[in-house]
Amino acid sequence: MSLSNLPRDVLVGTALLGATFVAGVYVGKRYFLFRRKKSQKIFEGKNDPRRGYLLRLSLRQHPAAKKLEQVGTEHHTDSRYLEQRLSGATSQDVSSDVAQLLGNLTKAIGSRKVLEMGRSYGYNPLILALVLPADGKVTACVCDTEDITCARASWREAGVEDKIDVRIKPAEETLDDLISAEETGTFDLVSLNMADRQNCKKCYEKCLRLLRSGGILAIDGVLGRGAVLTAKSTDTMSQELHLLNEAILRDARVSLSTLPLGDGMTLCFKI
């Protein structure tokens, strides 16, 4: 029997059944992809209960570090900071889990001399200084807009203020000063935050010069808040950061691991 001989109701019903089947397959596939994508996400945000669980069972903080972290949290809620954050003018954050990892790495390789160029309002230098031996030293590069008044009080409370040498200069100037002072190859660990950093490749090269063989260069912010994924020709900093990530992958002078911590962290182990 040809289709033209079938009753109209049968034809309409068959068409509706077919359309329902196709729609079901489409919706099911989209739902599956959505669930798979969602399940692949590490955390939904800083308040994700899974992240809270991991921090509760892994984070060990000195009382002075806890206070300083709270100061940083309160600072990030004020209107001036939020305005800067929205405009992209700052991305300074206290990330206690990242700082603890750096502290553990510092201790694991027996560091005595560390260079810290993060943007944590003095939190990272405190964590690093706490794990260094009595004769250890943290050279902390601080930008002129970074208020470390509370940090100094916390450093004194923790008894590590004498271990921290503060340089209030742009990162490249600090690196040039250290190289001019013939301190190349003397640092055990260098921590570099790439957020809003220009001349990424130059900073990387200078940090590598200062690092000893077997030392660790920890680069935070390698995702550029996601901008490296969609870097446009007008976004110079994102382009530079993406090119640096590509260059590190091909750099035979280091072994590397990139971790999904914070805004992305690459650990470079100098060969």
Image (cartoon, grey):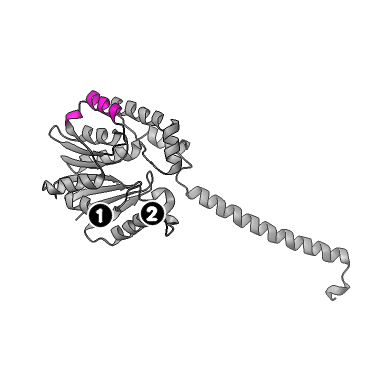
Residue most extreme to the bottom: 2
Give the labeled residue for mark 2: 238
Q: Residue at x 22, y 25 (%)?
A: 156
Q: Is the N terminus in the top left, top right, bottom left or bottom right quadrant?
A: bottom right
Q: Residue at x 24, y 23 (%)?
A: 157
Left or right: 210, with 146 as reference point: left
Image location (x, y in percent) of residue 209 = 18, 53
Left or right: 130, with 228 as reference point: left
Labels 1 and 2 touching (C-beta < 8 A) = no
Amino acid type of the residue that numbered disc 1 sits on in the rendered structure: Lys
Pick the front one: 204 or 256: 204
Q: Residues within 10 Å of mark 2 (few under 14, many from 20)?
A: many
Q: Is the C terminus in the top left, top right, bottom left or bottom right quadrant?
A: bottom left
Rounded to the nearest angstrom, the CA distance separating label 1 from label 2 is 15 Å
Q: Secondary structure at mark 2?
A: helix
The rendered magenta stretch, by its main secondary structure, is classed as: helix
Q: Secondary structure at mark 1?
A: helix
Q: Is residue 154 magenta?
A: yes
Residue 57 disc label: none
Image location (x, y in percent) of residue 233 = 42, 60
Write down the quadrant of residue 201 in the picture. Answer: bottom left
Left or right: 226, with 97 as reference point: right
Image location (x, y in percent) of residue 50 = 45, 38
Give the labeled residue for mark 1: 202
Amino acid type of the residue that numbered disc 2 sits on in the rendered structure: Ser
Image location (x, y in percent) of residue 139 = 20, 39
The image shows residue 78, relative to residue 25, as above or below, that is above
The span shown in magenta is: 146-162
For the image, the number of numbered tags is 2
Q: Is residue 83 magenta?
A: no
Write down the quadrant of residue 109 in the picture. Answer: top left
The image shows residue 128, relative to residue 21, as above or below, that is above
